[in-house]
Image: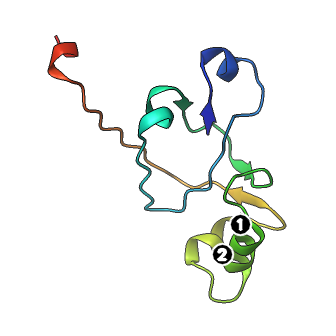
């Protein structure tokens, strides 16, 4: 999830953007997403997918039809929720030398 700033994140308002990231996903931040927005994984057991940017009718059909990926079969709770499992987040940042001292 992405928030515009600390005040937005602390306000309890909905994030500016939410994304569904399947297992083993890689998300690379750059430009405004990297420099101007906060991001994080909210602590909860179930995610509501309605309102998630990439939870489209096509994604819903692909992930709920026969032959869907194993993670989707295991985690999706009809009609539009996702049961969370263990996840890991790794952050690697490039800090220019002038700022690293």
Secondary structure at numbered mark 1: strand
Q: Nearer the viewer, residue 4 or 49?
A: 4
**Few, some or many C-alpha atoms within 10 Å of disc 2 (few <14, some 14-19, many ≥20)?**
some
* Cα distance between the residues tagged 1 and 2: 6 Å
- Pinpoint residue 46: horizontal percent, then vertical percent: 72, 50
* For residue 55, above or below residue 57: above
Going 68% across and 79% down the picture, which residue do you hit?
62
Going 69% across and 20% down the picture, which residue do you hit?
8
Residue bearing the label numbered 1:
76
Q: Are marks 1 and 2 in contact (CB under 8 Å)?
A: yes
Q: Nearer the viewer, residue 50 or 17?
A: 17
Going 43% across and 36% down the picture, which residue do you hit?
31
Q: Residue furthest bottom?
A: 66
Q: Residue furthest top?
A: 101
**Few, some or many C-alpha atoms within 10 Å of disc 1 (few <14, some 14-19, many ≥20)?**
some
- Pinpoint residue 73: horizontal percent, then vertical percent: 66, 75
What is the number of the mark on residue 1?
none
* For residue 56, above or below residue 14: below
- Residue 18: which quarter of the image? top right
Going 36% across and 42% down the picture, which residue do you hit?
90
Q: Please tell me how many numbered marks the rendered image carries.
A: 2
Q: Residue furthest right?
A: 79
- Residue 21: which quarter of the image? bottom right
- Name the quadrant of the C terminus: top left
Q: Residue furthest front?
A: 31
Residue bearing the label numbered 2:
73
- Name the quadrant of the N terminus: top right
- Pinpoint residue 83: horizontal percent, then vertical percent: 68, 57
- Residue 15: which quarter of the image? top right
* For residue 67, above or below residue 94: below
Secondary structure at numbered mark 2: helix
- Pinpoint residue 93: horizontal percent, then vertical percent: 29, 33
């Amino acid at each position: 999830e992405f928030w515009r700033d600390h005040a937005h994140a602390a306000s309890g308002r909905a994030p500016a953007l939410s994304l569904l990231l399947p297992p083993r996903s890689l998300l690379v931040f750059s430009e405004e997403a990297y420099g101007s927005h906060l991001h994080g994984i909210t602590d909860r057991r179930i995610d509501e997918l309605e309102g998630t940017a990439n939870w489209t009718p096509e994604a819903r059909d692909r992930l709920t039809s026969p032959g869907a990926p194993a993670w989707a079969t295991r985690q999706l709770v009809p009609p539009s929720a996702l049961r969370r499992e263990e996840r890991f987040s790794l952050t690697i940042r490039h800090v220019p030398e002038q700022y690293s001292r």
